[in-house]
Image (spheres, rainbow, N blue to C red):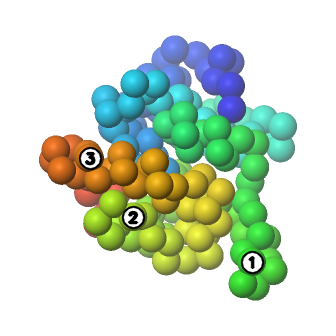
């Protein structure tokens, strides 16, 4: 989502709070040429506010895949399930890192991982390279994984 209406002060708060990494896939912005963006967790289109409680830091890949969506259908149950919310949810309760693969462990994790395309071939290769160079998961990411 566009973050053009986010003040510089709020942008800095969101980025600092996220330790300058994507709060969805946990890749640091220094490992992305495109950096990260401020994302409305609940988009303005759906009544979300431009406040710290409704904003997170997201890499361009996660942010573009998420768009203004709020969730998706769990194909096993047929139920609508909301996405992972970095302000309310603990990453390690919904996902597990297995080498370079982000495995969902809940329905929330499943729909989030699928729609945000965490485990596309390109993203797994990227995380494998970051793991090989000792850059993933970062110490900040490990705190979110193991909290």
Q: Residue at x 65, y 57 (%)?
A: 115
- CB-based contact (under 8 Å), mark 3 and mark 2: no
Q: Residue at x 53, y 29 (%)?
A: 37
Badge 2: how crowded within 10 Å, few (<14), some, or many (20+)? some
Q: Which residue was labeled with disc 2?
A: 101
- CB-based contact (under 8 Å), mark 2 and mark 1: no
Badge 3: how crowded within 10 Å, few (<14), some, or many (20+)? some
Badge 1: how crowded within 10 Å, few (<14), some, or many (20+)? few
Q: Of tags 3 and 1, which is closer to the observer?
A: 3
Q: Which residue was labeled with disc 3?
A: 129
Q: Residue at x 73, y 60 (%)?
A: 71
Does residue 105 appear left or right of residue 101 in this picture? right
- Disc number for residue 3: none
The Cα–Cα distance between marks 3 and 1, rounded to whole angstroms, is: 32 Å
What x and y, as percent, mark residue 41? 64, 45
Quadrant for the N terminus in the image: top right
Q: In this figure, what is the number of numbered marks?
A: 3
Secondary structure under the numbered disc 3 in the rendered image: helix
**Which residue is nearer to you in this view: 100 or 104?**
100
Q: Which residue was labeled with disc 1?
A: 75
The Cα–Cα distance between marks 3 and 2, rounded to whole angstroms, is: 12 Å
Does residue 35 appear left or right of residue 143 in this picture? right
Q: Quadrant of residue 67?
A: top right
The Cα–Cα distance between marks 2 and 1, rounded to whole angstroms, is: 20 Å
């Amino acid at each position: 989502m566009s973050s053009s209406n986010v003040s510089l002060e709020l942008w800095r708060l969101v980025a600092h709070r996220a330790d300058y990494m994507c709060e969805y896939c946990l890749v640091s912005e220094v490992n992305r040429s495109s950096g990260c963006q401020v994302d409305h967790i609940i988009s303005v289109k759906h009544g979300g506010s431009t406040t710290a409680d409704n904003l997170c830091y997201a890499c361009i890949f996660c942010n573009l895949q998420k768009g203004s969506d709020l969730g998706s259908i769990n194909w096993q149950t047929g139920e609508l399930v909301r996405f992972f919310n970095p302000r309310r949810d603990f990453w390690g309760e919904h996902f597990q890192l297995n080498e370079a693969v982000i495995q969902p462990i809940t329905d929330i994790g499943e729909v989030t991982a699928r729609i945000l395309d965490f485990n596309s071939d390109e993203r797994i290769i990227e995380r494998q390279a970051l793991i090989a160079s000792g850059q993933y998961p970062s110490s900040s990411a490990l705190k979110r994984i193991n909290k």
